[in-house]
Image: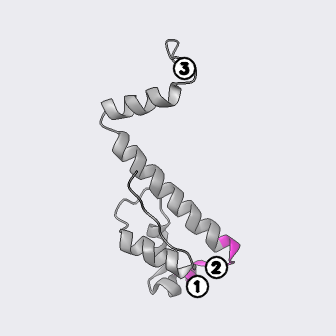
């Protein structure tokens, strides 16, 4: 832990650090992928959807589904995420902030 950090401002300093290191965009994208993968998995559990049924809904293989649910796979497209959301009765929402 840094001794010179101002109380209540650690998050701001960490974001600044990531930005200065050129890692903020990468860290943000990784966090978004992790949240989306977690949300899809949670929805599958809630709806008692196994891999086979989810893959069928997406008209893809179980291997492709595993890649979709892998938060470290940065090759997943928005179109695939949108199809996955629709397959579980949800919508994918993105916004510029």
* Position above or below: 7 against 52: above
> Which span is picked out in magenta?
45-54
Q: Position of residue 24 (x, y in %)?
A: 37, 40
Q: Secondary structure at mark 2?
A: loop
Q: Position of residue 35 (x, y in %)?
A: 53, 56
**Mark 2 to mark 3: distance in Å?**
42 Å
Residue 63 appearing in the image: no
User: Who is closer to the viewer here, 96 or 82?
Assistant: 96
Question: Can you tell which quarter of the image residue 46 is in?
Answer: bottom right
Question: In which quadrant of the rendered image does the N terminus lie?
Answer: top right
Asked if the magenta segment contains residue 50, the reply would be yes
Tag shown at residue 11? none
In this image, 72 relative to 88: left or right?
left
Task: Tell me the residue that label 2 is attached to.
Answer: 49
Residue 23 appearing in the image: yes
Q: Main secondary structure of the magenta part?
A: helix
Q: What residue do we see at 47% from left, 69% from top?
A: 92
Q: Secondary structure at mark 3?
A: loop
**Mark 1 to mark 2: distance in Å?**
6 Å
Task: Tell me the residue that label 3 is attached to.
Answer: 1
Pointer 1 and pointer 2: residues touching (CB < 8 Å)?
A: yes
Question: Can you tell which quarter of the image residue 40 is in?
Answer: bottom right
Crowd around label 1: few <14 · some 14–19 · many ≥20 (10 Å): few
Tag shown at residue 53? 1
């Amino acid at each position: 832990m840094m001794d010179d950090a101002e109380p209540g401002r650690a998050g701001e300093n960490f974001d600044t650090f990531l930005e200065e290191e050129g890692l903020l965009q990468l860290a943000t994208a990784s966090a978004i992928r992790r949240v989306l993968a977690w949300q899809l998995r949670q929805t599958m559990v809630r709806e008692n959807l196994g891999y086979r049924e989810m893959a069928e809904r997406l008209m893809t293989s179980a291997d492709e589904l595993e890649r979709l649910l892998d938060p470290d796979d940065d090759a997943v497209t928005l179109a695939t995420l949108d199809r996955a959301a629709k397959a579980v009765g949800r919508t994918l929402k993105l916004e510029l902030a």
